[in-house]
Image (cartoon, grey):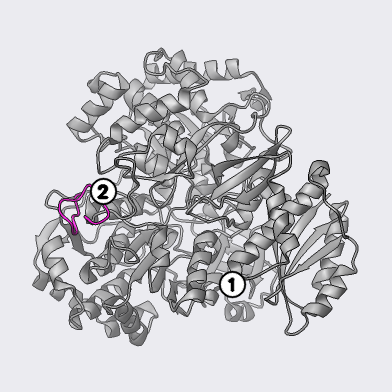
Amino acid sequence: MPIKSYIIIPQLDQKQSLMDDIAKMEGCEVHPAENKEVLVLVTDVETESEDKLLISQIESNKNIKHISLVSGYE
Amino acid sequence: MNEQIEDKDLSRRQFLRMAARASAIATAAVMFPGIVFAEEQERMIEKLGAIDVKWTKTPCRFCGVGCGLKVGISDGKAVAVKGDPNSSVNKGLCCVKGYHSILALYGNDRLTKPLIRKNGKLVESTMEEALDLVASKLRNTIAESGKDSVSIYGSGQWTIPDGYVASKLFKGAIGTNNVEANARLCMASAVTGFLSSFGLDEPMGCYEDIDHADVFVLWGNNMAEMHPVLFSRILDNRLKRSVKIIDLATRTTRTSHAADKSILFNPQTDLAIANAICYEIVKNRWVNTSFVEKHCVLKEGKTNIGYGLEENFQFNDEAKSIDFETYETFLEDYSPEKVAAYSGVSAKDIKYLASLYGNPNNKVMSLWCMGPNQHTRGTWINNLIYNIHLLTGKISTPGNSPFSLTGQPSACGTVREVGTLTHKLPHGVVMNEKDREMAAEIWKVPVENIPSKPTHHTVSMFRALDRGDIRFMWIQVTNPMVTMPHLNRYRNGAKKDDRFIVVSDVYPTPTTDIADVVLPSAMWIEREGMYGNSERRTQHFNQLLQPPGEAMSDTWQLIEVARRLGFKEQFPWDESTHIEEIWKEYSRFHVGKKHGMAPYEVLKSQAGAQWPYVEGKETKWRYHGKYDPACKGDTFDFYGKPDGKAWIWARPYEPAPEIPDSDYPFWLCTGRVLEHWHTGSMTRRVPILHQAVPKSYVELNPEDAKRLDIRNGDQVKLISRRGEIVMDASVDQRGKPVSGHVFVPFFDESYLINELTLDAYCPISKQPDYKKCAVRIEKI
C-alpha cells in the first residue's frame, strides 16, 4: 500500500484548476496552502503498479510547474 | 477522500497517510517560510503525537550534517520519521534520505546469520562458531606473521563506542597500529588542514554561522544534494535578508542553479584561485593587519611533493617560518590575470571573489567537503582557504567561518575524535610518549604494547594486503570493494588465497562477496550508540528495536573477540550498560576545557551537545575568548599551537598527476546524488529512493555528446588506464559537466566506477583524489 506525499508548484494562476483536477483522481488528497502557490498532495493506492500509473497521470497535467516527492511508505 | 480521524481508532494506514501529509507540510514550511495551511491540516501534525506510537529522538543514520530525527515505534517496528524540532541542527526538517531512513532497516535481504566460507562458498553458521573462528584466525596470524600482519578497517559510520573498542583492541591490547577507517578517503585532508593551520582538528564554528553570514562561498561543494538541510538553511536566510551564495565548482549542479553566481574552474586550479584571492587581498590592503600581526605566523613547506603512486611512498612535510614580504613575493605568481590563463576563471571573477572576502563589512562563510578534500593537494587547499579567512580576520566569530563539512554521520565523532587512524590515539598521536602513556593507563595495558610508529594509511593498508604484508583484515560498516580507487588491484589482492577477510555489515555487498567470514550487524537504532557530526556535536541514540536474527552490534562483536583473545580485563563491561561505561572511559581522554565531552546523562536527555563541553555549557565558537572558555584572554587565542598563533601557509599550485591527453581526453569526476547514501547498500534497498535514481550513469556536456553522436540514454564505454565500464549516458539531466569533463556517481555496485579511478593521494593527508583522472569515451 504505497502512501506518498508531494509538494506541487502549479503554473501561474492554475492552483485552483490543478487542485480540482487532482482531487477528482482516486487515491489523491490535496491540501492547498492558504497564502502561497503551493499544494501538498498525498497519494494512497494498493499496489506499486497503481502508484506508478497514478503519478504518471498526475505528472502529465500541464498545470504542474514542479512536483517533488517528500515522503513515502510501503 | 475526506476522512474523519478519531484519535482512538486510527488505523496504521491512516497513520501513515497523516505522517506523509505532515512531512510534506513541514517540508513546505521550510521551503516557503511563512506558508500557511488550513488549521485542520496543521492539527494533523499534533495528532500524530497522540496515538499509540512512541516517538524517540535519534540522529539520522546518513550524512555528517547529523539531523535530529524522531522515530515512531509501534509494535516493535519503526513506522514513521519526522524531523526533531528540538534539534538545533535541522529544526524539524529532513531530507529525502532522512524521511525514508527507517525503511533501510527492512530490506528483504538483511544479513541475519553469520556466514563462513567453506569450500569456496559462504554458508550459514552460528555467531559462536563465527566469532571463535575470527578470534582463532587473529591469534594464529599474529603467531605466524607478527602483530602487524593483522588489521582493522572501519568507518565514519562506526558509532563512537565501535571505534573506541576497535582502537583499544588493536592498538592497546594486540599492539598494532594497523587501524584505519574510510574517513581517510573523505576527511583526512580536512584533518591535516586543521592540524597544520591551527594545531587542533575540527571546525572552530558551527551551523549557527549560517544565520549570521552575509556571503557563502561554496568550494567544490554541491550542498543542494550532499547537505540539503544546511543548504535549505542558507536559502532560508536569503529569503529573509540579503545574502549572497557563490558556487565555485568544476561542474554545474543543482547548487549552481540555486546560487547567486556560479563560477566554474578547471580541476586542481582551486589552489591557484585561492592564492589569487589572497594576492588581491594583499594588493588592495584588505589585510586585517592587526589580526595577522597578533594572531598569525607565516610558513612555507616542501614543494613538488609527489602523488603517492609509488609502492611504499613516504613523505613528511617540514614547515619553515617566512616573513610577510616573502609571502607577498610568493603571491606574485598568482595575480588574477596570470591565474585566469589556466584556471578557466576570469580575472574579473577572481577579483569579485576577493572583494567579497575583502569587504570588511561582509561576514563570510566558506563551506567545502569532498572537492577540496579528495584532492592530491588536499591539505594545501584546506590551508589556502584558511589563509583567506586569516588574512581578513574573518574567523571564530559568528558568521565568519571557514567550515569543513563532513560526509559521514560520525567521521568526526569516531574517526577524528576517537582517532581510528594509524597515527592517532583517542588523545593525541602514537608518536607522542605522553599520549601513549595516557592511553596505556586508561586502557590498562603496558605502555610498550602501543607501538610508537604509525603503520599503514588506507591505500597503503590495501597495498600491504595485496603484497601479503597484511594477511588478516576485519572490515566493519564500510564497503571498500566499491570505494577503493584503482579497485581492480585491491580486490584481486583481497581475494588471494592466504588472506583472511572478516566483514561486519547489514546487507550483502561486493565486500561481503570477498569475505571469509560475514558477521551480521545490528544497524543504527537496533543498538545504543553515539555519533559526532560536523559541528562538534555528539548525539546519543537509544536501542529502539531488536536487531534481526543473530545480528549483533559491531561494538559487541569486537568485545566478544577481544575476550576470546584473553583481554577480559580490558573489556569487562556488562552488555546492558556497556555503552554508558565505554563513554565514561572514553571521556577521560578528553577531560579539560579544550575538548571536554558532555556527560552520558546529558547526551541521553537532549538532541546532542557540542564539545568543548565545559561546566555544563557547550562551546559554539572556538579560539575566541568571548565564546571559548579554553582561551586565554577575551580575544583570539589559537591554542592548538604553542604560541597561540594560527599559521598562514605559502602553498603553490601544482598540477594533478594524471591530466587528459590525446588518448584519454576527458576529466573523470566521481561523486554522489541526493537520493543515495555512499555505495547505496542501504538506500538502494529503499524502494522510493531506488526508483528515484535506479542506476548509475555518466553525465556528459551536451556539446561533447553532440560531437560524439551520443544522446541521453545511449550506452557508452568509459575507459581509463586502469579499467573500463559500460553505462548509460546522461545529457542535460541533473548535472552538466563543462566540455571535456564527465561525472559518474559511485552509489551503484553494478557500475564500479572506481575500477577506473587513480589511487594517487595527498602526500600529507594520504587521502586519494576521486575527482580527477583521465578517461576516453566510446559510443557502444
Q: Residue at x 63, y 43 (%)?
A: B71
Q: Is residue B161 left or right of residue B518?
A: left
- Does residue B764 appear anywhere in the picture? no
Q: Is residue A4 left or right of residue B607?
A: right
Which chain is indicated by disc 2?
B
Instruction: Return the mark for residue B700.
Output: 1
Q: Is residue B630 left or right of residue B404?
A: left
The number of discs equals 2
Question: In the image shown, does B153 or B144 lie closer to the viewer?
Answer: B153
Task: Give the structural element (helix, strand or loop) at label 2.
Answer: loop
Q: Residue furthest bottom?
A: B348
* Main SS category, magenta section: loop
Instruction: Return the mark for residue B578.
Output: none
> Percent x, y for residue B780?
68, 66
Question: In the image shown, does B618 or B333 lie closer to the viewer?
Answer: B618
Q: Is residue B273 above or below residue B15?
A: below
Q: Quadrant of residue B418?
A: top left
For the residues bearing labels 1 and 2, Cβ distance under 8 angstroms? no
- Label 1, residues with CA under 10 Å away: few <14, some 14-19, many ≥20: many
Mark 2 lies on residue: B200
Residues drawn in magenta: B625-639
